[in-house]
């Protein structure tokens, strides 16, 4: 039984690693979007005003 649990843990390690990588990527994307959103918002406002 102990060997089975150890094997199961070793098999779940790549999955945990993948989850961590995906979570880190999502955080990175969200932070990048959050930093760039004011610029995009400003550009949208400027183009909207220029059309008026």
Image (cartoon, rainbow, N blue to C red):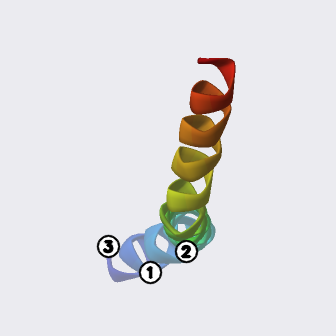
Q: Disc 3 marks which residue?
A: 1
Residue at image coords 58%, 74%: 17
Tell us which disc is closer to us: 3 or 1: 1
Residue 6 in the image: state x and y as whole percent. 44, 80
Marks 2 & 1, CB-CB < 8 Å contact:
no
Q: Disc 2 marks which residue?
A: 13
Secondary structure of the residue carrying numbered label 3: loop
Tell us which disc is closer to us: 2 or 1: 2
Point out the image quarter for the N terminus: bottom left
The crowding category of the residue bearing disc 2, from other C-alpha atoms within 10 Å (few below 14, some 14 to 19, many at least 20), is few
Does residue 30 sit above or below 17 in this rendering?
above
Residue 34 in the image: state x and y as whole percent. 48, 63
Residue 11 in the image: state x and y as whole percent. 57, 67
Secondary structure of the residue carrying numbered label 1: helix
Point out the image quarter for the C terminus: top right
Q: Earlier in the sequence, mark 2 or mark 3?
A: 3
The crowding category of the residue bearing disc 3, from other C-alpha atoms within 10 Å (few below 14, some 14 to 19, many at least 20), is few
Residue 6's label in the rendered image is: 1
Rounded to the nearest angstrom, the CA distance separating label 3 from label 1 is 9 Å
Secondary structure of the residue carrying numbered label 2: helix
Residue at image coords 56%, 51%: 42
Relative side of 1 to 48, left or right: left
Residue 31's label in the rendered image is: none
Question: Which of the 4 quarters of the picture holds residue 15?
Answer: bottom right
The crowding category of the residue bearing disc 1, from other C-alpha atoms within 10 Å (few below 14, some 14 to 19, many at least 20), is few
Marks 3 & 1, CB-CB < 8 Å contact:
no
Of 14 and 18, nearer the camera is: 18
């Amino acid at each position: 039984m102990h060997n089975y649990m150890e094997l199961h843990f070793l098999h779940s390690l790549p999955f945990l690693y993948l989850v961590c990588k995906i979570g880190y990527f999502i955080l990175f994307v969200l932070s990048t979007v959050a930093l760039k959103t004011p610029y995009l918002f400003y550009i949208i406002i400027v183009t909207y005003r220029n059309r008026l």
